[in-house]
Amino acid sequence: MSRIARSATVLAWISLSLLPLSVIATRWNVLHFRYGLLMYLLAALLGLLVIVMAALFTRRQQSDASRKALSQASLLSLPAIGIFTFSIFSAGDAPMIHNVTTAPDNPPEFIKAPSQRGADANPLKYTPELAKIQRQAYPELQTLTTELSAREAHQLALAVSRQMGWEIYYDDPAQGHIEAVATTRWFGFKDDIVIRINAGSEPTQIDLRSVSRVGQGDMGANARRIQAFIEYFREIE
């Protein structure tokens, strides 16, 4: 086997190994999340390098074993490239924000979340600058209205939250206030959610806000989460 084929094989295995290691290290707080994401990026870059090596050198190999090794290395590199590419396309043109709400003019306020978040967590303040960016990026996020009573809406909001896998850590039916945390599937990032049920409105109004604890941009995750809640609520009310 040629040196190029051996190098590509080693790099492909490193790429394949870094993919789960980046997730495990981040999810279980073995490494700071930034290092975990760097490992994730490195896995994709190494995979891309292997593909380039295979494209450039496969036909130049004199032995079938070397050509086969380069082909196998290419296959081993595909998971890292594929998953990374999927995550980028899923983000689309999402802006670099991590604080999203259905009510930019009067966002729901958190009560319990500050004690749940670490000292290094993102601030919870929702600024006019954020509101401007959000309106341009997510005009579809609007206050949810329902003909249910405030009490019924509160109970259904709790049920939907739990069904979506959120962990409820604050619930005040009298005030129509719910707070929860959602954990992302891959890296285990935690995002705090507040739900406000306005009992004084007719029909009943429900507003949500979702804020990432870490990271500057959420790749659209908070907006998708809120939209999924709204769609699920409407489906079963």
Image: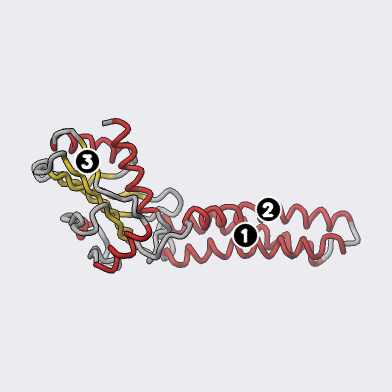
Give the CA distance from mark 2 to mark 3.
Answer: 49 Å
User: To which quarter of the image does residue 43 belong?
Assistant: bottom right
Q: Mark 1 belongs to which amino acid?
A: Ser
Q: Residue drawn 47% across and 56% down?
A: 91
| Residue that appears at 80% across and 67% down | 3
User: Vertical placement of 175 versus 107: above or below?
Assistant: above
Q: x, y (%) of residue 232? A: 33, 37
Dividing the image into 4 quarters, which one contains the C terminus? top left
Task: Look at label 3 and name its amino acid.
Answer: Thr
In which quadrant is the N terminus drawn? bottom right
- Picture layout, residue 127 above or below residue 190: below
Direction from residue 223 to residue 77 in the image, left or right: right
Q: Is residue 13 left or right of residue 214?
A: right
Residue linked to disc 3: 145
Q: Which residue is mark 1?
A: 15
Q: On the rendered structure, is 12 left or right of 147? A: right
Crowding at dot 3, Cα within 10 Å, few <14 / some 14-19 / many 20+, comes out as: some
Pointer 2 and pointer 1: residues touching (CB < 8 Å)?
yes
Residue type at mark 2 is: Leu
Name the front one of labels 1 and 3.
3
- Look at mark 2 in the image and give the residue it sits on: 76
Circle nearer the N terminus (2, 3): 2
> How far from the left and from the top, in percent, is residue 90?
49, 53
Above-or-below relation of 84 to 153: below
Nearer the observer, 89 or 182: 89
- Residue drawn at (71%, 60%) of the image: 51
